[in-house]
Structures are given as C-alpha cells and as structure tokens.
Image (cartoon, grey):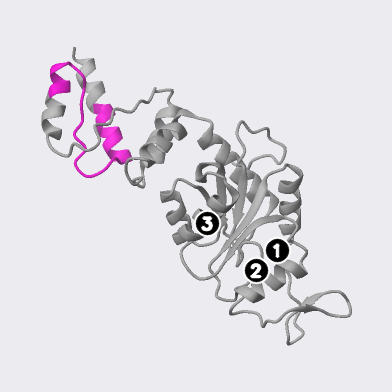
C-alpha cells in the first residue's frame, strides 16, 4: 500500500544513499549520453553533441525534502564515467545536497562502507535506493535497508522507502534481524518469517549457541524432554519450515 507523503514515522534514517544511473537520472552516464557536459545559452544541461540531458522530474524535490528534514544524503555509483557523473551533479546544482560521493567502478559494499566510515554513520542508520537487484542484495547482506527503484526516484518511492525503514527499525523483528546479522548471513526468508510472526502478535526471542556446530539433534532432544515443541532446521529457515513447525505445535498441543 502506498505511504502517505505526510505519514508520521517512528524512526527515520540518519542518511539516505542514492545510486545515480536509472535512479536519479534516466540513463547510464557512461553509455547513453556523451560527456563532457555544459550549459548552453538557454541554461539547459547538454552533452558535447548538444543533446539536452534531463534528470528524473522528482529528483530535486526528493533531495530538497531530505535536506529540509536534516537527513544526510550521499551517492554510491559504480559508473566508470566518474568525471561525467561529477559534472552532471555540479551542473544540476546537487553538490549542496551530498555529504559524500563514492563514484567509481566496484562493489556497492565498498561504496557504502566508505560512506559509513567517512560520515561516521552506522550502516543500520542508512537507507539505500538503487535500480539493480544485485546491489540491493549485496547491501541487505550488510544490514542496510535497501529499496529497489523500478522507474526512477519519485517522492512516493522515497516516502514508501522511509516507511519501510521505520517499520523495520522500530519493531522487534528489526531488532532480532540486527542481532542475527552479527552472527550469520541473513537467509532470504528471514525477514518474512519475523514479519509474519510479528503481524500475528507472536513474541520472538533469540537463543544462540554460536561457535558450537555439533549436536543439533541432541539439543532438539534436550528441549523436547523439557516439553518444548522443537523443530530441527536442516538447511535454513523458510516460511515453509515455519508453517510446518506451527502446524506441529498445534497438533501436539491440541492432543494434550
């Protein structure tokens, strides 16, 4: 469901990090346009062939909104056309918005960690917007709330993203995920599992015996002797494993 542009949020990020290509502007700066760029006599940004270069219509609104809310903004782009990207940012008048810019080929992991270090902002206090699923997956593994941008940045995409950040960071499920990410790489269904339980008003806790890789079956047997319904997770936690476990609990407790 779309988030209202004025909907109050319990938690807001300290920083928003944007990709550039197909996120803030509708092209690949190293492929679809022809740097160097400049402003023509009419004040329009053009490439060296004279073609007018435009950003997404809502991009200035998005950046101004975040600045007015005192939310820091940075850029993480893997483009090889670093000079061209920097030129466009300057010509569009966006440098005043960005606290840090990481624009060079490589992994978004590297970009976001450098931004975190240089700006002294923790990864869990950031939200990231990008048009490529691979980058979303990479940063979610680091614990960064990440939003896939399908058709360019708009105010609605921004507000929906901020609501997602608030929902994740202000609930028990989000706190549990933060803990788990410090222990293991997050499995794909983990967030779904935790969110499902929270929506059902089922309490969630963590009991971890890290560093102990043997004896899982013995541990299950121990808890079963204590009359705790216990489920052996053989590969990873999934929604199917959860639902099978809840059914087992229901079957056992209904027959007591």
User: Is residue 225 covered in magenta?
Assistant: yes
Mark 1 Cα within 10 Å, few/some/many (few <14, many 20+)?
A: some
- Foreground mark, 2 or 3? 3
Percent coordinates x, y for residue 36 in the rendering: 70, 82
Q: To which residue does mark 3 refer?
A: 114
Q: Is residue 22 above or below residue 137?
A: below
Percent coordinates x, y for residue 254 in the rendering: 23, 16
**Helix, strand or loop at mark 3:** helix
Q: Splitting the image into 4 quarters, where does residue 166 fall?
A: top right
Q: Nearer the viewer, residue 132 or 238?
A: 132
Query: Left or right: where does residue 207 sit relative to residue 97?
Result: left
Q: To which residue does mark 2 refer?
A: 26
Mark 2 Cα within 10 Å, few/some/many (few <14, many 20+)?
A: some
Q: To which residue does mark 1 refer?
A: 56
CA–CA distance in space, label 1 to label 3: 27 Å
User: Is residue 223 covered in magenta?
Assistant: yes
Q: Are marks 1 and 3 in contact (CB under 8 Å)?
A: no
């Amino acid at each position: 469901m779309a988030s209202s542009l004025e909907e109050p949020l319990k938690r807001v990020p300290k920083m928003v990090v944007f990709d550039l290509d197909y996120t803030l502007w509708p092209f690949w700066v190293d492929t679809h346009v022809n740097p160097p760029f400049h402003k023509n006599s009419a004040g329009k940004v053009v490439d060296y062939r004279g073609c007018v270069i435009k950003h997404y219509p809502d991009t200035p609104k998005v950046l101004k909104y975040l600045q007015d809310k005192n939310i820091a903004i940075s850029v993480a782009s893997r483009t090889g056309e670093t000079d061209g990207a920097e030129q466009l940012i300057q010509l569009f008048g966006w440098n005043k918005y960005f606290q840090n810019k990481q624009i060079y080929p490589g992994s978004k992991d590297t970009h976001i960690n450098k931004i975190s270090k240089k700006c002294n902002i923790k990864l869990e206090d950031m939200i990231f917007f990008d048009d490529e699923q691979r980058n979303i997956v990479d940063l979610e593994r680091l614990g960064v709330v990440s939003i896939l941008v399908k058709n360019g940045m708009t105010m609605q995409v921004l507000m929906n993203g901020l609501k997602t950040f608030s929902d994740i960071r202000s609930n028990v499920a989000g706190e549990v995920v933060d803990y788990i990410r410090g222990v293991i790489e997050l499995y794909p269904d983990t967030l779904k599992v935790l969110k499902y339980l929270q929506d059902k008003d089922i309490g969630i806790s963590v009991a971890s015996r890290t560093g102990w890789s043997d004896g899982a079956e013995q541990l299950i047997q121990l808890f079963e002797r204590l009359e705790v319904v216990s489920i052996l997770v053989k590969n990873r936690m999934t929604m199917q494993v959860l639902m099978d476990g809840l059914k087992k609990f229901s079957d056992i407790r209904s027959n007591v």
